[in-house]
Image (cartoon, helix red, strand yellow):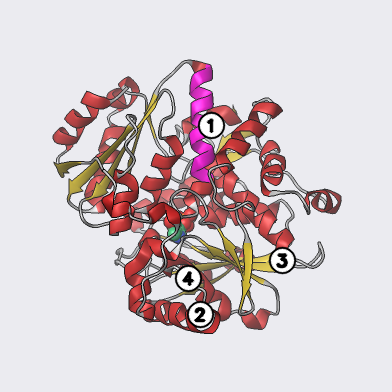
Amino acid sequence: MKYISTRGGIEPIAFKDAVMMGLSTDGGLLLPEKIPFINSRQLEEWQALPYRDLAFRVISLFCDDIPAADLKNLIDRSYGSFDHPEITPVVHKNGVNIVELFHGPTLAFKDVALQLLGNLFEYLLKESGKKMNIVGATSGDTGSAAIYGVRGKENIAIFILHPHGKTSPVQALQMTTVLDDNVHNIAVKGTFDDCQNMVKALFNDLDFKEKHALGAVNSINWARVLAQVVYYFYAYFKVSESLDQRVIFSVPTGNFGDIFAGYVAKRMGLPISQLLLATNENNILTRFVLHGDYSLGTVVPTLSPSMDIQVASNFERYLYFLYNENPLRVREAIEEFSKTGRMNFSTEERSIVTSDFLSQSVDRQETLDTIAAFYQETGYLLDPHTAVGVKAAQDHRDRNLPLICLATAHPAKFEEAVITATGLPPERPASLAGIEKLPSRCEVLEADLVQVKTFFEQLAL
Ligand SMILES: *Cc1c(COP(=O)(O)O)cnc(C)c1O
């Protein structure tokens, strides 16, 4: 399986190179040359597989340059860190099916991908004899999941910038209580945008990037999307009564990574009727699906901060398919967008979009009401991101298809929102019990690139 760029500017490359490259060197995103199709006989074979075996079958189709035994071992180790034997169990509440994606070490779905990516990096660096310094900015979930993905690993160091005092307290502690030598937390006296801009500046300094072998873990890495394809299959098999049963997946969306994984599963032949794209008040993607209006707004802070995004970095992958795999059209659209802040779509394109997606934007009050009502009716607590998806699903019951909601975080990660909704703090899972009392390590710096660079250079591998 070879990988190409959505912008058509690179020769096809192998899976391993795609993992190490992250963003394509022509500025585009990497995609498999061809998405494999799973026929009904294969679906039947996969139906009863445990999560890890299913993951091996799915991932093998996209990765033919790692020996099978090694790949199996990487996958088994990656999901050994989950606290549930099913990895992503499905529960049934009030007529909706909920896939719990928060059983990894940092209690958010990003662990599903980053546990695997960390192991892949370590494996590939060992093979090439190279080192890597990962640098990233986080508003909360990505940072801790990335840190847990690479903590204690050989030949990798990680530097994560977060805005000082602006993540949830639990989110900050999940990062700063990791004391491994290769983990470096920087609390920046500034905003998430300050963090993001400094990280971008480091990557744009090509000499610096090369000299220090900078690596990224953001959701543009193909391996992250790929790891997430697996749970769409897994959840489908748990919910469907027959293998021609069509279903709807409701996906709380920010960077379009998770929902794009669902789109890949659909293109592989999994009987997904449509993907329900659920957004909070930052609803550019909902406007796109419902009205063909993809135009830039300003980011507003919400109860579901991991979805407070306007320009979704994985959206370009969908555009590539919407434009019939024509990289020229993708380039034109991206250029238009960077000039005007909007993209326009033909009637025909819009009808393709609505055959792939449903969409709904859910506001603050609806999110709180959904958490409260769901808790009252079922005793089950939703985190504010999951609640956005559940509310959207409840409003699409008239489709008469099984609805599967992705639960992207454990409610204990967002205590404040849960308390506002229900008046009660969520029960903490074992990994968070007493986290405030654990020793922690974190460097507090001004939002100043020189300070950040100096700190980095002292500790980089
Ligand atoms: C990152 C995140 C999302 C959004 O996922 P995308 O892949 O960016 O669309 C939703 N919920 C939670 C809890 C997250 O951490």
Query: Element under label 1?
Result: helix
| Local SS, label 4 | loop
* Percent coordinates x, y for residue 339 in the rendering: 34, 53
| Magenta residues, start to end | 113-127
Image quarter (top left, top right, bottom left or bottom right) of the N terminus: top right
Q: Are marks 4 and 2 in contact (CB under 8 Å)?
A: yes
State the residue in front, 419 or 362. Answer: 419
- The kind of residue tagged 1 is Leu
Image quadrant, ligand 1: bottom left
User: Is residue 29 in view?
Assistant: no
Residue extending farthest to the top is 129
Q: Amino acid at mark 3?
A: Val
- Horizontal arrangement in the rendering, residue 402 relative to residue 162 (left or right): right
Look at 25% across and 26% down and name the residue there: 459
Q: Which residue matches tag 4? A: 382
User: Within 8 Å: ligand 1 and the Cβ of disc 2?
Assistant: no
User: Is residue 403 visible in this depiction of the protein?
Assistant: yes
Tell me the residue that label 1 is attached to: 120
Dot 4 or dot 1: first in sequence order is 1
Question: As displayed, is residue 16 above or below residue 388?
Answer: above
Q: Amino acid type of disc 4?
A: Leu
The residue that label 2 is drawn on is 374
Q: Earlier in the sequence, mark 4 or mark 3?
A: 3
